[in-house]
Image (cartoon, rainbow, N blue to C red):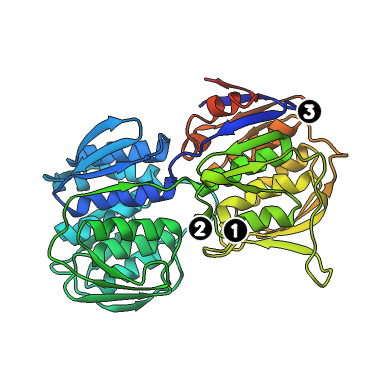
Amino acid sequence: MSSFIIEGGHTLQGTITPQGAKNEALQVISATLLTPEPVRISNVPDIADVNNLIALLQDIGVEVEKHNVGDYSFSAREINLDYLHSKDYLERCARLRGSILLTGPLLARFGQAAIARPGGDKIGRRRLDTHFLGFEKLGATFCYDEASSIYLLKATHLRGNYMLLDEASVTGTANIIMAATLAQGTTTIYNAACEPYIQQLCKMLCKMGANISGIASNLLTIKGVESLGAANHSILPDMIEVGSFAAMAATTGNGITIKNVGWPWLGIMPEAFRRLGVTLEQRADDDMFIPRHEHYQVDTFLDGSFMTLADAPWPGLSPDMLSALIVVATQAKGSVLIHQKMFESRLYFTDKLIEMGAQIILCDPHRAVVVGHDRALRLHGRRMASPDIRAGIAMLIAALNAEGTSVIENVEQIDRGYERIEERLSSLGAKIYREG
């Protein structure tokens, strides 16, 4: 396993451009299985999760052509369905959370799918009920083999249906949408997720010939078509990476510009920074500028009550942003309650920040109170290991702030979501090195 060696206390300055959105990439690349025609996708991020998915598709039989950096064509003309039941395929699915997104397209086009329990971040229970209940509503049958942890799905013909999702799952919504595009009749999905990734997926599918209405709402109507065709699509900038860079700029920056952030797609995230006292300036050409912050102060609500930041479905605050915002709060003046509603293990990484000197009270698996001391209490370097993508980047932000040297192990977790992060931060003035 690789490690990052970070020499803290160096000021960051300059310009940085976010990568393509990881979550959107996993969805739209999976959707290329829905057609034998070529689908060209640009702004594909060069990160481990996406690269592993592309390699998996190639082994299934998808022809992949790389035109340029981040620019690929996918042609799923001939698929090796036997490989879907091989030990190699199932083992690779078990290591890649995004592999669950292959089930909807495979089921819709080929009438079958097999997948092992997906892997990914260690952030608590991430149930798959929404996916499989949606497939059942469309007429599929599935069984789970507990001995091998394999899900098997079959459907002679998918048929449109009305469904009220038990939760507004982003990947669950995406999977059901992809399956419904080739189903007979009309599918109505209520309580659908409406994140930018879902909107982008729907727009690409419509370019391919799908009939989807209600895009950007939580009520989607999909009229099934017989087949889908070729299309070109460009992936949005990754809003979580934008937020991560903003957190670095607030805590260690001396004026940082983030290029092409996609302001309309950031939802309430900029307001969350402002509630912590951080200034984000919208510049021409869709850029964001974060000036130097010698001090910043946590706001209160209008009635003077204690500030709370909580995750919520888009356009609310993404749960993926809370880890970085916790680090931002440690350097603020004032206190804030962070409420992580979705995953019961995601706040456990705060024990590493506490060891670095942060004043954090972990109330329970879902809530943490961060007491900021206006930079009077500096963090100090530590050795730590990244348990997941977002905790890893939060540890990295903390290490950039800290006095002394920090070592972050298991940075393969960070590589899953952040493209060449050490090179890009070094260009801003960070002292960060990869070892191993």
The residue singled out by tag 2 in the image is 125
Q: Are marks 2 and 3 in contact (CB under 8 Å)?
A: no
Pointer 1 or 3: first along the chain: 1
Mark 1 or mark 3, which is nearer to you?
Answer: 3
Q: CA distance from mark 2 to mark 3?
A: 35 Å
Dot 2 amino acid type: Arg
Q: Is residue 410 positioned above or below 41 on the image?
A: above
Residue at 39 percent of width and 42 percent of height: 95
| Front residue of 138 and 328 | 328
Pointer 1 or 2: first along the chain: 2
| Front residue of 124 and 407 | 407
Viewed as shown, does residue 165 lie left or right of 323? left
- Percent across and percent down for residue 16 are 55, 34
- Percent across and percent down for residue 67 are 26, 31
Residue at 16 percent of width and 67 percent of height: 225
Viewed as shown, does residue 264 lie left or right of 171? right
Dot 3 amino acid type: Glu
Confirm whether residue 116 shows in the render.
no
Residue at 38 percent of width and 60 percent of height: 199
Viewed as shown, does residue 205 lie left or right of 69? left
Q: Is residue 324 positioned above or below 203 on the image?
A: above
Dot 1 amino acid type: Glu
Q: Is residue 302 positioned above or below 358 on the image?
A: below
| Front residue of 294 and 90 | 294
Pointer 2 or 3: first along the chain: 2
Residue 403, numbered label: 3
Confirm whether residue 167 shows in the render.
yes
Question: Around disc 1, counting alpha carbons within 10 Å, would you say few (fewer than 14), some (14 to 19), or many (20 or more)?
Answer: some
The residue singled out by tag 1 in the image is 344
Q: Quadrant of residue 135?
A: bottom left
SS type, badge 1:
loop
Q: CA distance from mark 1 to mark 3?
A: 31 Å
